[in-house]
């Protein structure tokens, strides 16, 4: 994707979750303080695609919940050292205002001082796990700085969501994700930390087949569908959801950082030939298992 920004899609949006779908946990939603959201949107405008929904974080969450999404997993990432404590406090406070309908993830800048203490404090405040983004934070997932993060998540029984796929790539990143990221590198992590639950977004784009094989062979790896089902990114996907391990795929929207209607991928599910059981798993049950290791109703406590 090292090319000019992609266009906006002016597709029609629905007013609610399609009635034919089962309960939905959106496992990939971004929230930030306004002071960080604004430069992120400027970056997307210049180098990725125009963001359609320019909302504050409370508005982001209210938007989805008011339209029938049962539960939201809110993600963030620290783009530089020294801001993780603030972001984690912001997330915990934000989640506390939504009566258990939002689960927030902590973050850390890999290699910053006191990483273990920062993360343990964030998890003790009620955050559900940790989110990292290799393209933005420019870390080597097999580097020494990462071990403390993996160890805290494993010891605290909290999952890690890590954008470890190579795409989307942009020359505006300070590092080359095709060098830093690979399914082989991620396999080393899940093999060396078997008690660490990991989710890789975007079905591992663009190494779809490699990640399909990994979830078949490792019990501690999940993938989410974010943006892959929208038929928007110019990345060929040779993998069909009904051919993948059914208990390891989570639905995520990437809302609000999308250039098309909020329910575009949900409408894809209504047109699919996926079985009712597979829809229930992908749209809610697998997220419940990933975050709590319990198969129960699609609601997550903060």
Image (cartoon, rainbow, N blue to C red):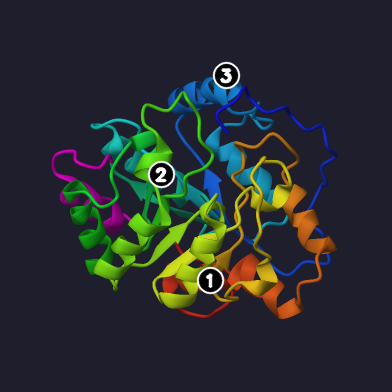
Decide which of 39, 117 is in the foreground and name it: 39
Which of pointers 1 and 2 indicates the residue nearer the eye? 1
The answer to whether residue 301 shows anywhere in this view is yes
Label placed on residue 5:
none
Q: Which stretch is magenta?
A: 109-126
Q: Say whether disc 1 or disc 2 marks the residue closer to the N-terminus.
A: 2
User: Residue 115 lies in magenta, yes or no?
Assistant: yes
In what element is the residue under mark 1?
loop
Residue name at image x 33 percent, y 36 percent: 138
- Crowding around mark 1 (Cα neighbors within 10 Å: few <14, some 14 to 19, many 20+) is many
Quadrant of the frame with the C terminus: bottom left
Q: Is 302 above or below relative to 132? A: below
- Which element carries disc 3, helix, strand or loop? helix
- Position of 257 relative to 91 (above/below): above
Residue at figure coordinates x 63%, y 68% from the top left: 282
State left or right for residue 89 relative to residue 58: left
Question: Label 3, on which residue?
Answer: 46
| Membership of 58 in magenta stretch | no
Q: Residues within 10 Å of mark 2 (few under 14, many from 20)?
A: many
Q: Are marks 3 and 2 in contact (CB under 8 Å)?
A: no
Q: Is residue 235 above or below residue 242?
A: above
Kindly report which numbered mark, 3 or 2, lies closer to the viewer in this rendering.
Answer: 3
Instruction: Report how far apart the C-alphas of labels 1 and 2 lie in the structure.
Output: 26 Å
For image coordinates 24% across by 51% down, the residue present is 119
Q: Position of residue 133 (x, y in %)?
A: 40, 43
- Name the residue carrying label 2: 91
């Amino acid at each position: 994707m090292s090319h000019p920004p992609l266009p906006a899609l002016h597709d029609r949006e629905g007013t609610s979750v399609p009635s034919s779908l089962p309960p939905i946990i959106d496992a990939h939603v971004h929230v930030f303080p306004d002071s960080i959201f604004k430069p992120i949107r400027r970056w997307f405008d210049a180098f990725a695609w125009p963001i359609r929904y320019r909302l504050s974080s409370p508005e982001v969450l209210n938007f989805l919940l008011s339209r029938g999404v049962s539960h939201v997993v809110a993600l963030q990432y620290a783009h530089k050292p020294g801001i993780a404590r603030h972001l984690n406090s912001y997330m915990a406070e934000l989640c506390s205002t939504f009566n258990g309908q939002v689960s927030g993830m902590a973050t850390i800048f890999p290699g910053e001082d006191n990483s273990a203490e920062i993360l343990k404090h964030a998890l003790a405040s009620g955050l559900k796990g940790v989110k990292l983004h290799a393209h933005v934070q420019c870390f080597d997932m097999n580097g020494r700085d990462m071990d403390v993060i993996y160890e805290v998540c494993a010891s605290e029984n909290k999952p890690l969501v890590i954008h470890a796929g190579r795409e989307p790539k942009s020359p505006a990143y300070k590092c080359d994700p095709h060098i830093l990221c690979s399914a082989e590198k991620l396999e080393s992590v899940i093999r060396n930390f078997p008690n660490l639950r990991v989710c890789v977004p975007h079905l591992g784009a663009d190494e779809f087949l490699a990640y399909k094989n990994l979830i078949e062979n490792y019990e501690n790896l999940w993938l989410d569908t974010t943006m892959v089902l929208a038929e928007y990114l110019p990345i060929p996907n040779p993998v069909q959801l009904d051919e993948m391990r059914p208990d390891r795929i989570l639905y995520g929207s990437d809302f609000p950082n999308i250039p098309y209607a909020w329910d575009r991928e949900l409408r894809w599910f209504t047109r699919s030939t996926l079985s009712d059981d597979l829809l229930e798993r992908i749209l809610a049950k697998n997220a419940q298992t990933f975050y709590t290791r319990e198969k129960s109703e699609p609601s997550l406590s903060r």
